Image (spheres, rainbow, N blue to C red):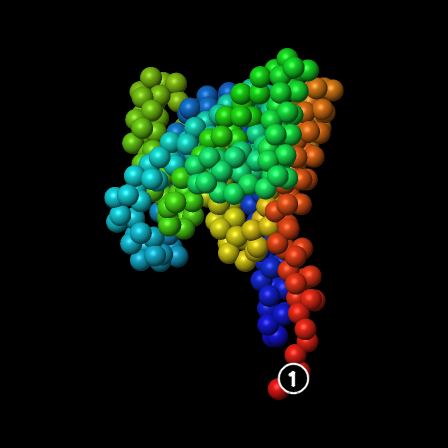
């Protein structure tokens, strides 16, 4: 196989993995809607506990403990993962609540805004440079949120909570040199004592849903796989793709959520929503065009190089 063919196959596999991850995340409302009637904190607790079971089983089956354990012997690494665990659990909790409260549209807005929040956090906390176009994109997205408040008379706290908790989670994880599986395992292990205590309290009070009905029991037990598998797909995709390609694929998630909210769940999409989403989509187009700048420049730079005589 030629190097070019190998690169093409590797990129195709990366698109398949990353695309599957974002598509799975986009269809999460279908899964959490099927748990309607189970309180969000209970779903979150089971998601944490079953993620521990699933990831430990997977690491054992793949014989990856030698890879997973060494980076986790650092106290600084564990402390940072404890912080990231707090923010990802808040993100999960708000998202689960939003889906079962009929606010999938607002949740999708949060994940459309998230890339721009990430840019802003990078500028503020990491002193990353920002171009004029990126600044314009961030300001335009903020204008879209303001339009939603003014025209739709709704403060999109769900969208902002999702965007900022996931943005801060990414900011913390950026400083931790562990792979996705090891990081997720430590995060859910840190959260598991509180989750286990809450589930045990529900069981003693006779208010728990696990074991009460076969359907809810099966769906709660699947929450570990539902959580971990897309993250593993995502990690496999990122290893094979340019970040610019990953950046384009990430819009699959909120687009699918938006379609489900409007077309399947019947959530209202008002003129205020249209104007706000329009501002945000334009801002994302600006952001994406700017992010693709180095990719567009590469072929031009290659073409500009003088041809060398064969040796």
Residue 3 visible to an observer of this rendering: yes
Residue at 43% x, 28% y is 90
Residue at 57% x, 56% y is 241
| Looking at the image, residue 84 lies above or below residue 148 | below
Decide which of 142, 106 is in the foreground and name it.
Answer: 142
* Residue ID for mark 1: 310
**In the picture, which quadrant includes the N terminus?**
bottom right
Crowding at mark 1 (Cα within 10 Å: few <14, some 14-19, many 20+): few
Question: Where residue 171 appears, x then y in whole percent?
Answer: 44, 39
Q: Would you say 178 lies left or right of 98 here?
A: left
Residue 30 visible to an observer of this rendering: no
The image quadrant that residue 296 belongs to is: bottom right
Q: Would you say 198 lies left or right of 17 here?
A: left
**In the picture, which quadrant includes the C terminus?**
bottom right
Q: How many marks?
A: 1
Decide which of 52, 125 is in the foreground and name it.
Answer: 125
| Looking at the image, residue 23 lies above or below residue 147 | below
Question: Where residue 266 appears, x then y in whole percent?
Answer: 69, 22
Residue at 34% x, 57% y is 67
Question: Where residue 49 appears, x then y in whole percent?
Answer: 37, 35
Q: Residue furthest top?
A: 153
Where disc 1 sits, the SS reads loop
């Amino acid at each position: 196989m030629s190097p070019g063919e190998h690169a093409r196959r590797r990129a195709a596999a990366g698109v398949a993995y990353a695309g599957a991850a974002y598509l799975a995340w986009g269809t999460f409302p279908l899964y959490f809607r099927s748990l309607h009637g189970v309180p969000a904190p209970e779903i979150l607790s089971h998601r944490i506990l079953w993620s521990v079971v699933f990831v430990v089983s997977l690491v054992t089956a793949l014989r990856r403990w030698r890879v997973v354990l060494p980076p986790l012997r650092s106290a600084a690494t564990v402390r940072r993962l404890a912080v990231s665990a707090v923010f990802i659990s808040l993100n999960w909790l708000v998202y689960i609540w939003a889906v079962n409260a009929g606010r999938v549209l607002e949740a999708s807005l949060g994940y459309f805004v998230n890339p721009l929040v990430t840019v802003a956090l990078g500028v503020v906390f990491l002193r990353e440079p920002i171009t004029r176009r990126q600044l314009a994109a961030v300001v335009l997205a903020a204008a879209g949120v303001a339009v939603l408040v003014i025209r739709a008379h709704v403060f999109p706290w769900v969208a902002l909570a999702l965007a900022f908790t996931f943005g801060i989670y990414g900011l913390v994880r950026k400083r931790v040199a562990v792979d996705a599986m090891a990081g997720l395992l430590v995060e859910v292990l840190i959260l598991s004592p509180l989750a286990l205590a809450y589930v045990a309290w529900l069981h003693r009070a006779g208010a728990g849903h696990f074991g009460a009905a076969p359907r809810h029991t099966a769906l709660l037990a699947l929450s570990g796989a539902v959580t971990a598998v897309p993250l593993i797909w995502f990690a496999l995709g990122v290893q094979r793709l340019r970040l610019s390609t990953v950046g384009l694929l990430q819009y699959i998630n909120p687009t699918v959520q938006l379609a489900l909210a409007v077309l399947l769940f019947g959530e209202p999409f008002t003129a205020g929503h249209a104007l706000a989403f329009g501002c945000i989509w334009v801002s994302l187009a600006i952001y994406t065009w700017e992010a693709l700048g180095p990719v567009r420049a590469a072929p031009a730079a290659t073409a500009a190089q003088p041809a060398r005589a064969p040796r």
